[in-house]
């Protein structure tokens, strides 16, 4: 191979690597989400779907949920409080559903496991 072709190839590889690095760096600043829906049924049998919620923070289930289906690619933890604190939590793995007993308090919030 001529020297000029090798230099062009190296320059092309370096430029491609730099471009890929910039692309990854700019995407990492975006908020990460739990890909897929979290679907829940309220006490009045309304079905609510949250698509791809953020993996950060606490998410409220308004006005409360008696059944929660985790259709995301990551696990979630259900809480009976609005601020993702307190005892009585339930761990719901990806693609599973949790249904409360009729006498149980509703789920009020959830957080993700990441």
Image: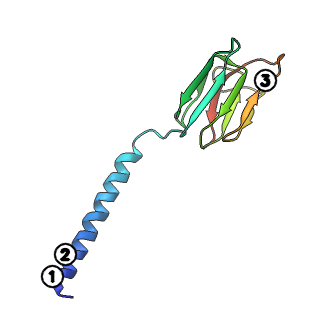
The structure residue drawn at horizontal position 31% and vertical position 64%, both measured from the top left corner, is: 17
In the rendered image, which residue does mark 2 sit on? Answer: 8
User: Is residue 7 positioned above or below 66 on the image?
Assistant: below
Quadrant location of the C terminus in the rendered image: top right
CA distance separating discs 3 and 1: 70 Å
Kindly indicate whether the residue at mark 1 contacts the one at mark 2 (C-beta within 8 angstroms): yes
Q: Nearer the viewer, residue 94 or 112?
A: 94
Q: Earlier in the sequence, mark 3 or mark 1?
A: 1
The structure residue drawn at horizontal position 22% and vertical position 81%, both measured from the top left corner, is: 6
The picture places residue 112, in percent across and down from the top left corner, at 61, 37
Q: Residue furthest left?
A: 4
Residue 100: mark in rendering? 3
Q: Nearer the viewer, residue 68 or 14?
A: 68
Instruction: Describe residue 2's horizontal placement relative to residue 68 as left or right.
Output: left
Instruction: Describe residue 64's horizontal placement relative to residue 32 as left or right.
Output: right
Label 3 residue SS: loop
Q: Picture quarter containing residue 63?
A: top right
Residue 44: mark in rendering? none
The picture places residue 64, in percent across and down from the top left corner, at 67, 17
Q: Picture quarter containing residue 83?
A: top right
Q: Residue furthest top?
A: 44
Q: Residues within 10 Å of mark 1 (few under 14, many from 20)?
A: few
Instruction: Describe residue 51's horizontal placement relative to residue 81 as left or right.
Output: left
Task: Count how many numbered circles sit on residues in the image.
Answer: 3
The picture places residue 105, in percent across and down from the top left corner, at 77, 17
In the rendered image, which residue does mark 1 sit on? Answer: 4
Q: Residues within 10 Å of mark 2 (few under 14, many from 20)?
A: few
CA distance separating discs 2 and 3: 64 Å
Label 2 residue SS: helix
Q: Picture quarter containing residue 30?
A: top left
The picture places residue 42, in percent across and down from the top left corner, at 67, 17
């Amino acid at each position: 191979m001529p020297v000029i072709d090798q230099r062009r190839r190296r320059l092309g590889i370096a430029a491609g690597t730099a471009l890929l690095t910039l692309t990854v760096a700019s995407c990492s600043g975006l908020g990460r989400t739990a890909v897929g829906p979290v679907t829940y049924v309220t006490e009045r049998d309304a079905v609510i779907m949250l698509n791809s919620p953020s993996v950060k923070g606490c998410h409220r289930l308004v006005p409360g949920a008696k059944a929660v289906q985790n259709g995301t690619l990551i696990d979630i933890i259900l809480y009976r409080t609005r601020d993702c604190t307190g005892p009585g939590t339930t761990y719901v793995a990806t693609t599973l559903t949790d249904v409360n007993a009729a006498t149980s308090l509703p789920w009020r919030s959830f957080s993700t496991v990441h």
